[in-house]
Image (tube, rainbow, N blue to C red):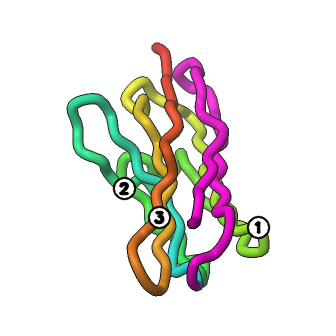
Amino acid sequence: QVQLVESGGGLVQAGGSLRLACEASRRAFSINAMGWYRQAPGKQRELVARITSGGTTTYADFVKGRFTISRDNAKNTVYLQMNSLKPEDTAVYYCNVAWTRGRDSWGQGTQVTVSS
């Protein structure tokens, strides 16, 4: 069974930075895309950023210019560098892997809290 191991969440002041990492323990099939979603209390889960196997990136408008997604294909790892963090970025961040076959895999979530 594939396991996604997330790390890097925590508490930071507004304007600060955090780097999230997510490693897929093994590959079920080829990876189509890897990404990060987030869910704040009382809100729906939303896409933050996504990167395809070819390196094409997609960002939500609310993080453009502040967050950068990258991946290390050899390590089956995706990163999210978050700069200029705002209190409204506070949420649980989930790693997602979209395989070329079958259902997506999700991480357990890592809490990011930005204080004002």
Please give the range of residues in magenta.
1-29
Between marks 3 and 1 in the image, the one whose residue lies nearer the viewer = 3
Contact check, label 2 and label 1, Cβ < 8 Å: no
Q: Is residue 11 above or below residue 47?
A: above
**Residue 5 included in the magenta stretch of the image:** yes
Give the x, y percent position of residue 9: 59, 33
| Quadrant showing the N terminus | bottom right
Front residue of this view, candidates 25 and 72: 25
Give the x, y percent position of residue 102: 41, 80
Q: In what element is the residue under mark 2?
A: strand
Q: Earlier in the sequence, mark 2 or mark 3?
A: 2
Between marks 2 and 1 in the image, the one whose residue lies nearer the viewer = 1
Look at 49% across and 23% down and name the residue there. 114
Q: Few, some or many C-alpha atoms within 10 Å of disc 2 (few <14, some 14-19, many ≥20)? A: some
Look at 49% across and 45% down and name the residue there. 108
**Residue 28 included in the magenta stretch of the image:** yes
Give the x, y percent position of residue 48: 42, 53
Q: Which residue is mark 1?
A: 75
Q: Which residue is mark 2?
A: 47
Q: Few, some or many C-alpha atoms within 10 Å of disc 1 (few <14, some 14-19, many ≥20)? A: few
Front residue of this view, candidates 42 and 19: 42
Q: In what element is the residue under mark 1?
A: helix
Look at 50% across and 31% down and name the residue there. 111
Q: Amino acid at mark 2?
A: Leu
Left or right: 32 in relation to 55: left
Contact check, label 2 and label 3, Cβ < 8 Å: no
Q: Which mark is residue 105?
A: 3
Q: In what element is the residue under mark 3?
A: strand
Q: Earlier in the sequence, mark 2 or mark 1?
A: 2
